[in-house]
Image (tube, rainbow, N blue to C red):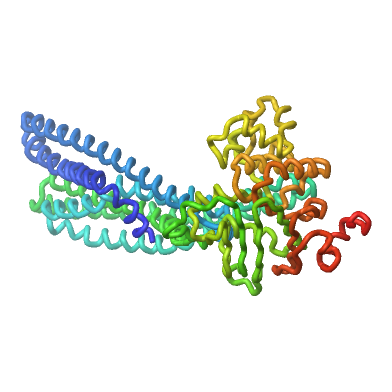
Amino acid sequence: MLIRLLRTHLSPYKKPITLLVLLQFLQTCATLYLPTLNAHIIDNGVVKGDTGYIVSFGALMIGISMAQVVCNIGAVYYGARTASAVGRDIRAAVFDRVQSFSAREVGHFGAPSLITRTTNDVQQVQMLTLMTFTLLVSAPIMCVGGIILALGLDVPLSAVLVAVVPVLGICVTLIVRRLRPLFRTMQTRLDTVNRVLREQISGNRVIRAFVRDDYEKDRFRGANTELTQTSLATGRMLALMFPIVMTVVNVSSIAVVWFGAHRIDSGGMQIGDLTAFLAYLMQIVMSVMMATFMFMMVPRAEVCAERIEEVLGTDSSVVPPSAPVVELRRHGHLEVRRAGFRYPGAEEPVLKAIDLVARPGEVTAVIGSTGSGKSTLLGLVPRLFDATEGEVLVDGVDVSTIDPKVLARTVGLVPQKPYLFAGTVASNLRYGNPDATDEELWQALEVAQAKGFVQTLENGLDSPIAQGGTNVSGGQRQRLAIARTLVQRPEIYLFDDSFSALDYATDAALRAALAEETAEATVVIVAQRVSTIRDADRIVVLDEGRIVGSGRHHELMADNETYREIVLSQLTEAEAA
């Protein structure tokens, strides 16, 4: 997964990667050449007392060192830029895919996990990419080059390398195999911490209302402790890595000095060559240590890449049309034909064989008990999810074939739980129509019965709105959401229990103003309050996902027991009549 992910997102950066590899090759070659020059200075300059030789070769070493520094700076620069660009591209790809998800896919992954995958997981892959460009590219060059040059200095002494390199490889492999499952558990438990923290921040008022502070502290402490324990287990494994490597390095250095001294004593080796051999041994071991450091990061990056690919490989159940319809008659005629909806793996469908027609200039109401499928029915129209059976038609065209932007302009939905974005009143109202004027905004606010409280705010339309609209009341949030849809001026208005937080007087005033504003549009209202929908042109009664009645208020009161029970649970017989 990791290799496939990086191959996909590194392909646009072939030129900077090629330049980076060239720079790393040059700086590594320079690093490898310096011990040989040092050996020449010792053997031909220091031992023989030739100062001129020392100065000339010393100047050459300085020049090569400067070239090494320049190449290294260039390699790090291009590596950092490329790694950052790859991280940006992966984040954008994950974000775009999440934006295409329907409610079904978002619910499957969960918001906390999607946030972790978009931020922390991408960061791990980006960091591995950076370390690969800055460390791993030069490591094999240095290791192979060091071995070749060491063999050139003294073949018998190079037998030490035959023992050192395999031992290091075996130790690193054993530790890395233990790290991978630990990193997978760590990312999962990081998701859990994010989920618990998100719930506690969002549900702060509920926690305080029920005085569950201690319970929530224990819950967070439990999730935090699990993450800590996994992190400690991972840290203990990582802590073994460097002591083992350094032990092998020190033992091998002692062995080189020991055997090298005997080689010098026998005349088979010069002092400068032994110094250079020690330098090459350190370079070989350092390259292995750099690779070791990379291997420490690889298991976690692999797990993160799998989680990222899981998101990127998930297709939305709401598929954009291949040949979209880009123009409608703009009459706002809505028809649902034998539509049904079933969640994956569910035993029973949420909606079954729904037939519904809503015409321009009419108000169609949908009522039913909790869980009867009212909100799901409305969600089929703007394609929050697609019907698993039947069709949903707007102006005679199946919504699954309409261009999403055209459908968004045609259908305006005020959800059951209205959401406001961080910004201002004006920026939220212009969400569906960025070109709306201030006059249009005030007009929409007046119809939504929100003009009064917005005028009392210090900055009016420019007053700040917190994320989620938490700095306004539930009723004010609903009215602003209704005004936002009015600014959009769609042909079809869908109100999903959008008046539940309003008092009766505001509800009545809002419905009266809406009737004038939406007189020529198609209006579909889902409501629990009978008083909200009793004057509708048509009332549809849902029960357990099926339509069990349709008609006007007085007709349903006379011959529909389900509707009658709902009405009489809220009104007296006299009020209902």
Q: In the picture shown, does residue 76 fall above or below 577?
A: above
Seen as rendered, the residue at the extreme bottom is 347
Give the quadrant of the C terminus.
bottom right
Whole-percent x, y for residue 285 in the image: 27, 52
Front in this rendered view, residue 188 or 498: 498
The answer to whether residue 217 is left or right of residue 69 is: right
Q: In the picture shown, does residue 126 fall above or below 399?
A: above
Seen as rendered, the residue at the extreme top is 458
Front in this rendered view, residue 453 or 270: 453
> Residue 346, can we see it?
yes
Whole-percent x, y for residue 484 in the image: 63, 41
Q: Residue at x 8, y 53 (%)?
A: 268
> Residue 226, can we see it?
no
Front in this rendered view, residue 480 or 56: 480
Front in this rendered view, residue 526 or 259: 526
Whole-percent x, y for residue 314 in the image: 47, 61
Q: Quadrant of residue 336?
A: bottom right
Q: Residue at x 65, y 47 (%)?
A: 520
Q: Number of marks in the image?
A: 0
Whole-percent x, y for residue 522 in the image: 65, 52
The answer to whether residue 504 is left or right of residue 390 is: right
Q: Quadrant of residue 346?
A: bottom right
Q: Residue at x 50, y 56 (%)?
A: 402
Give the quadrant of the N terminus.
bottom left
